[in-house]
Image (spheres, rainbow, N blue to C red):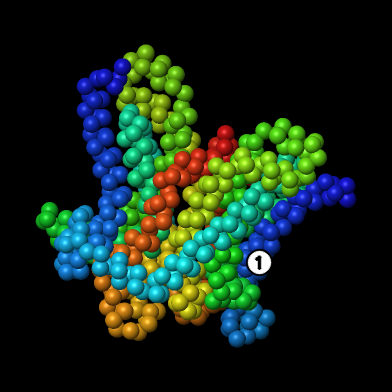
Amino acid sequence: MRTLKKTWPFHVMLLPAMIFLIIFSFIPMLGVVMAFQDYKPWLGITGSQWVGLDNFRYLFERDDSMQVIWNTLIIAILKMVFNLLVPFIFAILLNEIRKVGVQRTIQTLVYLPHFLSWVILGGILLDLLATDGFVNQILGSLGVKPIFFLGDNNWFRFTVILTDVWKEFGYNTIIFLAALAGINPSLYEAAEVDGATRWKQTLFITMPSLIPMAVVVGTLALGNVLNAGFDQIFNLYNPLVYQKGDIIDTFVYRTAILNGEMGFGTAIGLFKSAISMVLILVSYRLAKKWAGYRIF
Amino acid sequence: MYYKTRGYRIFNVFNTCFLILLALMCIVPLVHVLAVSFSAKSAADANLVGLWPKQFSLEAYKKTIDNPVFLHSIWVSVKRTVIGTALTLIITFLAAYPLSKENSVFKGRNVYSWLFVFSMVFNGGLIPFYIVIQKVGLMDSFWVLVLPGAVNTFLVILMLNFFRGIPKELEEASLIDGAGHFRTLFSIFLPISLPSIATIALFSMVFHWNSWFDGLLYMNNSKQFPLATFLQTVIIQRDMSSMSVNPKEMELISQTTVRAAQIFIGAAPILMVYPFLQKYFVKGMTLGSVKE
């Protein structure tokens, strides 16, 4: 009781946040029982019939859902790799620019796409990447046949990954730039005295200094292996590319919200949440072990 | 010195050109949209517009602003951004203070932080969430845009890390002088936290301005759509059924130039806000991501 007398302001301060967490986070978690039901909206959770693991069995038997899981993995993993690699290299190159004004200007410009939504960017890209769009006109002047970037199963994933890297590489660079700023300058001076060229300095000082950061970023990204980017895919895709471009989140939206297969949709969602949770916990543990990273 | 060698100077020229090119690639699409929005319909439809308007015209903007549904969606977005950001700021600020305390000072801290982390790593998925929204009566209500996203654990973490950087002596002095924790939080912490509050406000504003899916999912009446959702339906889905079936309006929305104008208006607030707040979010992001 004595501690409560001292700490009651803390509990009061946390109260609003807790109310929101309970309503919008914890109560929906209870709703996952729908994954084990043949949920009918008019019967509700209490009235719907229990079907055990049928929804999950169905998930693994359906060809389209397996394809969707596969698509999700491929897109997400490729995005992770390039969203790590490109900012890493970009940060090192940007760091070589000695004129502060130029460096700042470049930074300001590359951060920008991150802050625009996929609705805005999608609207722009739909026009730019159309068969008669700006990009194909440029390619056409180089003698390339028009490419249907967003309507061709062979090109869709490529386009999705490229545009995602384009949107995020500037923003993802920030963290590497911060790490670069933290490198002790005397290291470079010593190397200079020993006669190391700039390339050698980059190879033996800059890169090793950035690697711990890259490990943290890469490890934490592991938790996103089932997040291939709902906003982006939803705004860029169309029935022509469902085969190669449909991911778990868009699939849930179409099966559950549009087709009304609520139980099945919940099962996919639970499948995704459960695997993601395990991966996030593992990745946080690894990040803590390897780089001393902790969140709270 | 290495930067005086010939090889490095050549590299430097190429490097600078290459990076400037990359930077331009990040804004060229937007410049193109801007050019289209200021061009005449005929030039835009014939794909003649590059990075500069052809046959300059304000027609597209006039038509866009003439559309009451569009204007109302801007109003919904502004309202949501202001109220949503204010709510998020208050909740984040209040929650971060106790969570930034040592375990020995605040015994319950572990339980609370565990709850926050759990809500971050696990969720019920789209469908159970959708049903909760239905059951609490938020369908078709303005508040569905604001309330569910009010608590953002990442922002709480950002804020609490900032609080941890504040010298303990400040807080102790305040408590010794007889101020309670609330008073300390609002009179001592609030004024010195303004930079990180600005960061959180920026993230929250961008989130609310850009959110479109909740509008699409929970609003049955397109008259209540926020701007982002409105744009999603008319620009991405090119769905005229969400508009009135007036053929004149249909023709109006489907024009390339009008679409471009709408896209640009949708992006404008962010383009205006972000250069000024850049220094804050760069700090905020590195602060929230990795700790030494």
Q: Give the left or right position of residue B147, taking residue B107 as reference.
A: left
State the quadrant of the C terminus of chain A.
Answer: top right
Q: Position of residue A143 (x, y in %)?
A: 11, 56
Q: Position of residue B197 (x, y in %)?
A: 57, 47
In the rendered image, the residue lying farthest to the right is A1
Q: Nearer the viewer, residue B179 or A82?
A: B179
Q: Give the left or right position of residue B69, taking residue A43 as reference.
A: left
**Amino acid under disc 1:** Ile
User: Would you name the residue on which mark 1 appears?
Assistant: A23
In the rendered image, the residue lying farthest to the top is A193
Q: Nearer the viewer, residue B99 or B191?
A: B191
- The residue under the point 60% across, 53% down is B89
- The residue under the point 55% across, 57% down is B85
Q: Position of residue B105 (x, y in %)?
A: 77, 41
For residue B10, above or below residue A288: above
Q: Secondary structure at mark 1?
A: helix
Q: Nearer the viewer, residue B123 or B107?
A: B107
In the rendered image, the residue lying farthest to the bottom is A42
Residue A274 in view of the camera: no
For residue A117, above or below residue B160: below
- The residue under the point 59% across, 62% down is B123
Q: Which quadrant of the structure image shows residue B180?
A: top right
Residue B163 in view of the camera: yes
- The residue under the point 57% across, 50% down is B155
Q: Position of residue A216 (x, y in %)?
A: 50, 41
